């Protein structure tokens, strides 16, 4: 906040005070006094901990400076409620609380001055001052419950309105809340300035007022680019969604802004439910969650669903718990054997992550937490920990006489790490597992082709690289020819297609396996659950197989027993 901005605001305050009433003394002295009061008000807004008491003193000082006309307080409240939050990085609530105390101090000082000046003030004068105070307090109350840019009821007003509706609701009464996000306002504000952004919001509010009047809705502006329509006596989510559609139609024509024609988009979150037994905060929370779903799903609107909300909360709880769980060693690998199909010999294992939660909670499979780890970046330390555990276990089996290939999945995020090869080399050195007994599986995605140099660094260590889940995504045989891979794992979904009467799946697999063998690539069939599938992939030339037909993923001790 610049000194020039404060000086300009103080000058505007002085002009308002002059227009509102008599200003005694030299104008420069009055200007300096008002600037001092403004500095005190700004300091109070920023003070930690916050205390609104200085507002009372400023109100008293205005009267002491003989700037005591009733309209002076009104000018002060309107000016600072509209301008001051932008100069103090927001803090609108603090500004309004200070103005509330200022009005109280102002009117109290007025009353004291009036009593001191005229002990015989008649009853009509007292009534007049009470009316002035009531009017000023009503103006402040309106400022507290309405958005400055649009004049519409704000979030606090909406909560109050919902609370009143809930308190008066009969058992069968229903309600709908449609939360609207007007997309594009922030971009226009950044491009053309806050004044044009405010004008756009005011124009948006004007059109939404017409929608609310036509539909009998309650309209509120929750701040920035969010508005809410409340549908009374709704019959279901479809009726509330129609309110969103009406708003979208109303806002579809372009807005003229500073000589430009500007269009906005509308995304909506819809909540519809019985009123009785609910809470205002619950309605707003669910509406915001539905709005987030609409944005995530790239849809015009989304309807709140309790089941999806609980799934989201469950994911959030898991995400929050993962760092501590990793530190406590709750993530461990289970191992699924890899069988040579020609003689059913166990030649290796694939390490599959498990989350062993304490307190009797069920063990979680990677499908339940790996995507969360990737989203938060925790996959990097998690993948490193699992790789080290798998290498250490592989070395232990080797010392027991079981020379197994240990296959570990590598996340695309890990593949993007510049120091990955050095990290893997360090783990191999510390655990004692020979590099040629480690295989890293890369999911077939564009990341594999993008990070060919990283893959070459890994291959130079002497370890093996395999493309996992082939047949479900990006990878193709052309890409395989460019990558230093030694293995390919055919996805269980593609193997399952062999159960169908069509010969297409068999032809695809036969040609794929043949081309892989020509490239020196070993082929593993995943998802072998029946003897018929095993027989078919063996006939097609697959080298290795894994699946429930042979063994499920299990802790190291069980694999040791299996190895004999």
Image (spheres, rainbow, N blue to C red):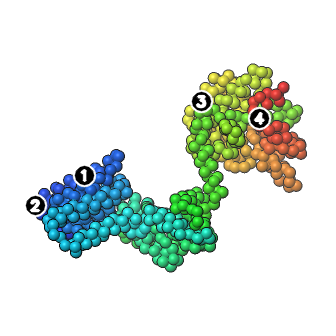
**Comes first in the chain, label 3 or label 2:** 2
Which residue occupies the foreground of this view, 460 or 53? Answer: 53
Residue receiving disc 3: 423
Distance from the alpha carbon under mark 3 to that under mark 2:
76 Å
89 left or right of 358 in image: left
Q: Which residue is mark 1?
A: 40
Q: Are marks 3 and 2 in contact (CB under 8 Å)?
A: no
Disc 1 from disc 3: Cα separation: 57 Å
| Mark before the other along the chain sequence, 1 or 3 | 1
Look at discs 3 and 2 and give the one toward the viewer: 2
Circle nearer the viewer, 1 or 3: 1
Classify residue 196 by image quadrant.
bottom left
Query: Residue 547, labelled with which disc?
Result: none
**Considering the numbered disc 2 on the image, is that residue within a helix, a strand or a loop?**
loop
Q: Residue at left 17%, top 56%?
A: 33
Q: Which residue is mark 2?
A: 26
Name the quadrant containing residue 379: top right
> Are there few (<14), some (14-19), or many (20+) residues within 10 Å of tag 4?
some
């Amino acid at each position: 906040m610049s000194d020039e901005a404060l000086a300009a605001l103080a000058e505007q305050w002085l002009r308002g005070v002059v227009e509102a009433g008599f200003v005694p003394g030299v104008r420069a002295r009055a200007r300096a006094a008002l600037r001092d009061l403004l500095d005190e008000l700004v300091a109070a807004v920023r003070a930690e901990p916050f205390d609104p008491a200085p507002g009372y003193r400023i109100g008293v000082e205005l009267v002491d400076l003989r700037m005591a006309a009733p309209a002076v307080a009104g000018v002060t409240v309107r000016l600072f409620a509209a301008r001051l939050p932008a100069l103090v990085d927001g803090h609108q609530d603090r500004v309004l609380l200070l103005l509330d105390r200022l009005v109280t101090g102002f009117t109290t000082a007025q009353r004291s001055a009036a009593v001191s000046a005229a002990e015989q003030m008649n009853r009509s004068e007292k009534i007049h001052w009470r009316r002035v105070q009531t009017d000023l307090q009503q103006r402040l109350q309106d400022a507290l419950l309405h958005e400055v840019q649009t004049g519409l009821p704000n979030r606090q007003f909406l909560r109050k309105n919902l609370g009143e509706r809930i308190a008066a609701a009969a058992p069968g009464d229903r309600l709908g809340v449609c939360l609207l996000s007007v997309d594009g306002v922030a971009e226009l504000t950044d491009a053309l300035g806050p004044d044009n952004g405010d004008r756009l919001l005011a124009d948006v509010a004007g059109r939404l007022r017409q929608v609310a009047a036509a539909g009998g809705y309650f309209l509120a502006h929750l701040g920035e680019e969010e508005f809410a329509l409340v549908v009374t006596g709704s019959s279901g989510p479809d009726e509330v969604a129609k309110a969103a559609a009406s708003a979208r139609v109303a806002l579809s024509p372009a807005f003229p802004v500073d000589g430009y024609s500007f269009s906005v988009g509308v995304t909506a979150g819809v909540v519809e439910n019985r009123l009785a037994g609910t809470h205002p905060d619950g309605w707003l929370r669910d509406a915001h969650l539905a709005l987030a779903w609409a944005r995530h799903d790239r849809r015009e609107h989304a309807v709140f669903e309790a089941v999806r909300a609980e799934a989201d909360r469950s994911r959030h709880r898991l995400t929050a718990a993962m760092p501590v769980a990793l530190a406590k060693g709750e993530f461990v690998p289970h191992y699924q054997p890899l069988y040579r199909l020609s003689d059913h010999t166990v030649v290796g294992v694939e390490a599959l992550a498990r989350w062993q939660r304490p307190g009797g909670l069920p063990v979680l499979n990677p499908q339940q937490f790996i995507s969360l780890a990737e989203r938060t970046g925790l996959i990097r330390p998690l993948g490193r920990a699992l790789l080290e555990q798998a290498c250490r276990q592989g070395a232990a089996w080797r010392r027991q006489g079981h020379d197994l290939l240990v296959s570990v999945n590598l996340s695309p995020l890990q593949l993007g790490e510049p120091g990955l090869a050095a990290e893997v080399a360090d783990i191999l050195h510390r655990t004692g597992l020979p590099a040629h007994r480690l295989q890293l599986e890369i999911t077939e995605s564009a990341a594999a082709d993008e990070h060919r140099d990283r893959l070459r660094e890994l291959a130079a260590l002497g370890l093996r690289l395999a493309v996992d889940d082939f047949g479900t995504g990006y990878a193709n045989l052309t890409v395989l020819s460019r990558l230093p891979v030694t293995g390919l794992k055919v996805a269980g979904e593609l193997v399952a297609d062999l159960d169908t009467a069509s010969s297409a799946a068999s032809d695809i697999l036969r040609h794929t396996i043949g081309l892989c063998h020509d490239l020196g690539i070993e082929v593993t069939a995943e998802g072998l659950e029946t003897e018929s599938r095993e027989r078919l992939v063996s006939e097609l030339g697959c080298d290795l197989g894994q699946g429930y037909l042979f063994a499920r993923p299990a802790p190291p001790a069980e694999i040791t027993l299996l190895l004999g």
